[in-house]
Amino acid sequence: QSALTQPPSASGSPGQSVTISCTGTSSDVGGYDYVSWYQQHPGKAPKLLIYDVSRRPSGVPNRFSGSKSGNTASLTVSGLQAEDEADYYCNSHAGSNSFVFGTGTKLTVL
Amino acid sequence: EVQLVESGGGLVQPGRSLRLSCVTSGFTFDDYAMHWVRQAPGKGLEWVSGISWNSISIGYSDSVKGRFSISRDNAKNSLYLQMNSLRVEDTALYYCTKDLPGMKGNFDYWGQGTLVTVSS
């Protein structure tokens, strides 16, 4: 159950797009279509942005999108806004009723 | 409105035990899997344990396996985490989370967390 690998930081200017990667193995990300993404602002509980690789819960803007290729999942934030500045985490099913989070990425809106 | 309210955290010495509780409302508790997720101060998220709606499927992270035990009482709409043999590295904010249908690790609701501090 090693943490999934995410870049420590990412950045973009307002209106731009940014993509955050989440790399695992064939035992987690590559083995299941159960990858989710979370946004966490300082001092707040995380918020679900994407589930089942690419599905968006109601209320989440369509600026947030998810995808997966092999052992790597990705979250793309389009049309960056100031309020998108936060920490982002991926999560994947890892078999045997276990799950694993990514290392987290701090997104800065320049 | 869905609500998840954790309690039971506090300061405890290494090697001692603590039991966390999570009381829920606003949804049909026994329809959903539930999980505990923790976050050490200034660190990232770590999945700790999960339990299916009927308590048949249970999972633990390697870091807590054999020391922690998850359970639920569907009649009381409550989730629990019994933590034994606590270590300094268990210090964290512990979140109670609800899964979407199934047990897929899609945590759609989170409590505000209860802080566990393990220190001598």
Image (cartoon, coloured by chain):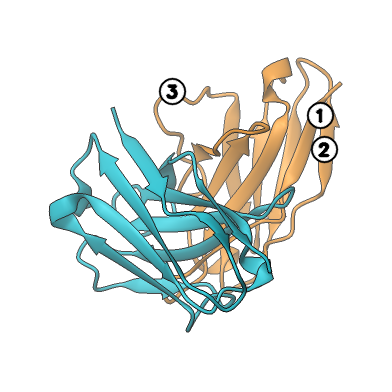
Chain colours: A orange, B cyan
Residue at the (68%, 52%) spot, across then down: B44
- Mark 3, other Cα within 10 Å: few <14 / some 14–19 / many ≥20: few
Q: Is residue A66 left or right of residue A104?
A: left
Q: Quadrant of residue B25?
A: top left
Q: Identity of the amino acid at label 3?
A: Gly
Chain containing the residue with disc 3: A
Q: Give the total number of marks visible in the rendering.
A: 3
Q: Identity of the amino acid at label 1?
A: Thr
Please tell me whether mark 2 sits on a helix, a strand or a loop: strand
Q: Residue A96, which numbered label?
A: none
Q: Residue A10, which numbered label?
A: 2
The vertical placement of B25 against A63, above or below, is below
Residue at the outermost bottom position = B66
Task: Quickly name the residue at label 3.
Answer: A59
Task: Quickly name the residue at label 1.
Answer: A108
Please tell me whether mark 3 sits on a helix, a strand or a loop: loop
Q: Are marks 2 and 3 in contact (CB under 8 Å)?
A: no
Seen from the viewer's position, the closer of residues A92 and B97 is: B97
